[in-house]
Every structure is written in C-alpha cells, then in structure tokens.
C-alpha cells in the first residue's frame, strides 16, 4: 500500500477541494480561481488532477495515473511528469508544495479536505443577541425566494443581521458570499451597480457591465449582500431582479432604509429589540446591553443593575446600536 496512516480515504474526500489558491470541482473537472474564472487545463492534465483529487492526501503511483489517464495505451511514463509539470505551472505551484512528488512512488495532492469559505463577509466580533428568530427567518426566506430586502430604521442592526444570515447560508452558496457596500455616491443604474458588484468580487468585466455580470454569475452559486440599497434607482433594482431570475444559483440579500415599490414583495421590516417590561433582564434589549458591557470588561450584577438597564433600554426604544453604545 502506498498510503500513510491517518490520512483521509477517497470516500472521505469532498466533491470540491481547495488546490492551492484554486478550487477544483471533482464532478465537472472545473478548476477556478478565487475570482471565479475558469483555469484552462488540457484533457490529460484535468484527468490527472481528477485522479489526484480522488485520493487527496494519499500517494498515487505513477503507474496508476498511466492506467487511468491513458487506458489500454502504451505510453512513455515521462508523460505523467510532463502533465504534472503543466498542472503545477497552471496553479503557480513552483515549489511543488501543492502537488508533491513522492520520490520512487508517485504524486500526492496536498489539498486540505475542505475549502475555505469564499467571499468578504466580515467575521462577527460579538454575538447577535436577541435576533435568533429574525436570523432564522432571514435564512429561510433567502433559501425560498433567493431575494430578501431587510428594511428598517438606522441603528436596528440590519447590516449585522444580514451578515449573520450570509454566514449561516455559506453551505447554500459554495461560490461565496459577497458584501457590496452601497453607501456614499449612488451607483448609476444597472451599469453602475454591476460595476460595484464586480469590484467587490474581483471580477473583470468588459463591454456592458450589466450583461457581463449576468454572464459571470450565471454558472455560480453565490450570495450578494447589497448593503444600503436605498441608494438604488429603478435601473439598478431591475438588474437585481434579472440576476435572480436569470442566474439560478444567485441569491440577493439587501438592506435598505426604505421598502422600494418594485421590491415590496420581498421586503421584511426589522423592528427594534423588545425592551424590558418592568425590570426584567431577560428581554432581548437588556440581554444585548449585558453582553456588550461584559465584552467591554464591565461585570454587572443582573439583579442590582436590572432596573437601570431596563430604563436605559426603554429610553433608547430598543435600538440595538444605541443600546450597544450605552453599554460601552
């Protein structure tokens, strides 16, 4: 056996692997970079990568590669080395640290068992307190409709909820979850929004940006988080609906101060957190206050602090941003 103890078996290898800085889909044989562009591979090179991916983390004899890639043919064994060299060049593996040569034995794909999540959704710095129901509903609606607009006043936590929902939906959108900030100057129509999305995703679009974005996203399964969609005009909103209609793997989660008329069927309003009734410290707004204070290094005795915390939360109307600022 040309295997090392403790390494994964072929049955444990996932259908998609990280290969260096690239991702390889075993079913389609497609190798893509982080921006989503397909890396061109010859038929033989793709076949060799498929065999290595089947047994990621295990030694694969050169004789097995010959049998699988050139079945029933008499081929110079040097052809395997030539194809492996081409693969390394395609993925920038100049030091052979991704496709390892196991001298006297064969080759090994040193790929991690699972790829890292793609996208630019920021990591949570603190728990999303008091929003368990809203988070579950947001994820459910995105899965159902692939389009959701979270509306509400400033300070209600629309962006934090949307980012948490995007992270929760990572398995549903394996090609990444991408935050597209729309604050500042409003993107001009469909072309402006397409350019803003392409910039966030690192896509190079030529010609008409909107058409290019549709073509680029059509084969992907990814989530776009449009933060600040109150800035979008009718043309940009039309592009959002076309992306969802024409790209079956794309989902759009947006935040907006207003419920645009053309997006109203997909709008859900986020209300402030429920405030304490009396001095109860179990209300979501009070829990957020306590968690934020503790994260800032201030330990509060729940019973003695509860009346003051309840009063602060009621005074702030349960707005999460205000509660967090007060607690800090």
Image: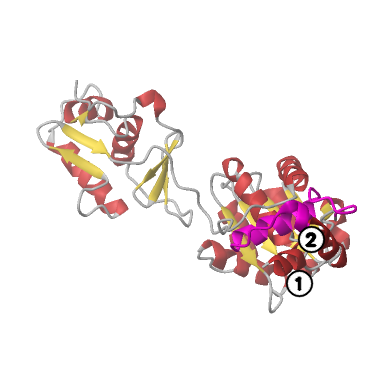
* Residue 42 left/right relative to 218: left
Label 2 or label 1, whichever comes before in sequence order: 1
Q: Nearer the viewer, mark 2 or mark 1?
A: 2
* Residue 12 left/right relative to 88: right
- Identify the residue at the far left of this view: 104
Report crowding for label 1: few under 14, some 14 to 19, many 20 or more residues within 10 A (C-alpha): some
Quarter in which the N terminus is drawn? top left
Looking at the rendered structure, which numbered label has been put on residue 309?
2
Q: Which residue is mark 1?
A: 231
Does the magenta segment cover residue 95?
no
Residue at horizontal 56 percent and vertical 65 percent from the top: 200
Q: Nearer the viewer, residue 20 or 76?
A: 20
Q: Quadrant of residue 54?
A: top left
Q: Nearer the viewer, residue 223 or 45?
A: 223
Residue at horizontal 76 percent and vertical 69 percent from the top: 232
The Cα–Cα distance between marks 2 and 1, rounded to whole angstroms, is: 36 Å
In magenta, the rendered stretch is 276-305
Q: Secondary structure under badge 2?
A: helix
């Amino acid at each position: 056996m040309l295997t090392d103890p403790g390494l994964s078996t072929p049955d444990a290898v996932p259908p998609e692997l990280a290969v260096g800085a690239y991702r390889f889909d075993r079913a389609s044989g497609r190798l893509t970079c982080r921006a989503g562009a397909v890396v061109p591979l010859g038929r033989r090179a793709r076949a060799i990568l498929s065999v290595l991916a089947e047994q990621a983390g295990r030694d694969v004899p050169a004789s097995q590669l010959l049998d699988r890639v050139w079945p029933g043919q008499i081929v110079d064994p040097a052809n395997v080395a030539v194809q492996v060299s081409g693969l390394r060049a395609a993925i920038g593996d100049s030091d052979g640290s991704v496709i390892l040569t196991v001298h006297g034995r064969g080759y090994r794909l040193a790929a991690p068992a699972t790829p890292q999540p793609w996208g630019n959704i920021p990591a949570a710095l603190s728990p999303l307190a008091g929003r368990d129901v809203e988070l579950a509903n947001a994820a459910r609606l995105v899965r159902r409709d692939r389009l959701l607009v979270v509306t509400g006043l400033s300070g209600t936590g629309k962006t934090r909820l949307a980012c948490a929902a995007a992270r929760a939906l990572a398995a549903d959108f394996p090609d990444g979850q991408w935050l597209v900030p729309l604050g500042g100057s409003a993107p001009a129509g469909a072309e402006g929004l397409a350019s803003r999305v392409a910039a966030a995703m690192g896509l190079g679009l030529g010609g008409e940006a909107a058409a290019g974005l549709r073509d680029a996203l059509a084969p992907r399964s990814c989530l776009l988080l449009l933060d600040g969609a109150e800035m979008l005009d009718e043309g940009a909103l039309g592009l959002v609906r076309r992306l969802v209609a024409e790209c079956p793997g794309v989902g759009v989660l947006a935040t907006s101060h207003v419920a645009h008329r053309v997006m109203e069927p997909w709008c859900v309003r986020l209300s402030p957190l429920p405030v304490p009734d009396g001095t109860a410290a179990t209300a979501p707004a009070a829990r957020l206050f306590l968690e934020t204070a503790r994260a800032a290094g201030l330990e509060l005795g729940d019973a003695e602090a509860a009346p003051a915390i309840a009063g602060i939360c009621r005074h702030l109307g349960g707005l999460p941003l205000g509660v967090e600022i007060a607690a800090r």
